[in-house]
Image: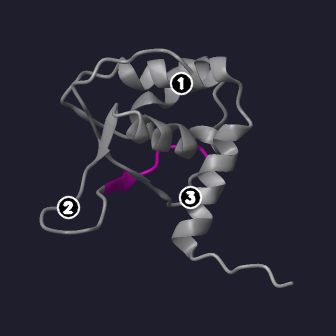
Amino acid sequence: MSTPTLTPAEAGARGRALSLAARRREEIAAGLAVIAAWPKGQTLSVNDVREQLDAIGFPNRARAGLFTRAVSDGLLIPVFYGGSDDQRTVPSTGHSAHGARVNVYGRTRLPYRSGG
């Protein structure tokens, strides 16, 4: 039996889901609360909440999954370049970024409801 081949997008989505699945419900809720505290209607990236996520001990490897969860929960929406399918990015400020870029999101006006 052969293993199905994943596209890069599918592999990335799977990795984000698995990285978050390893977190406890309380950890995810704390990370989402950090994102929800960002001013509604403003843009943000992981750069903007890095210190807060560090302070609660939220692991770097699970942060992309956290942002994906925040999108699915309606707290964030991806920001795209005008008239494009390309999500807006900015250079990462992480210590080991090595020139990586991080996605930009808009904080929606929805309130955060903790529930795991």
Q: What residue do we see at 35% from left, 53% from top? A: 90
Mark 1 or 3, nearer chain start: 3
Q: Residue furthest right?
A: 1
Whether residue 84 sits left or right of residue 75 in the image: it is left
Task: Write the start and end of the magenta stretch as one range.
Answer: 89-96
Q: What residue do we see at 48% from left, 15% from top? A: 114
Please give the residue where the numbered disc 2 appears in the rendered image.
81
CB under 8 Å between discs 1 and 3: no
Q: State the image coordinates of residue 42 (x, y, percent, origin top left).
A: 21, 31
Task: State which mark lies toward you, 1 or 3.
Answer: 3
The answer to whether residue 90 is magenta is yes
Q: Amino acid at mark 3?
A: Ala
Q: Residues within 10 Å of mark 2 (few under 14, many from 20)?
A: few
| Label 3 secondary element | helix
Q: Amino acid at mark 2?
A: Tyr
Mark carried by residue 57: none
Please give the residue where the numbered disc 3 appears in the rendered image.
13
Main SS of residues in magenta: loop
Viewer-proximal residue among 84 and 5: 5
Q: Amino acid at mark 1?
A: Gly
Whether residue 24 sits left or right of residue 86 in the image: it is right
Mark 3 or 2, nearer chain start: 3
In the picture, the quarter occupied by the N terminus is bottom right
Q: Quadrant of residue 38?
A: top left
CB under 8 Å between discs 2 and 1: no
Q: State the image coordinates of residue 70 (x, y, percent, origin top left).
A: 43, 35
Viewer-proximal residue among 47 and 42: 42
State how far apart marks 3 and 2 are (Cα).
Answer: 21 Å
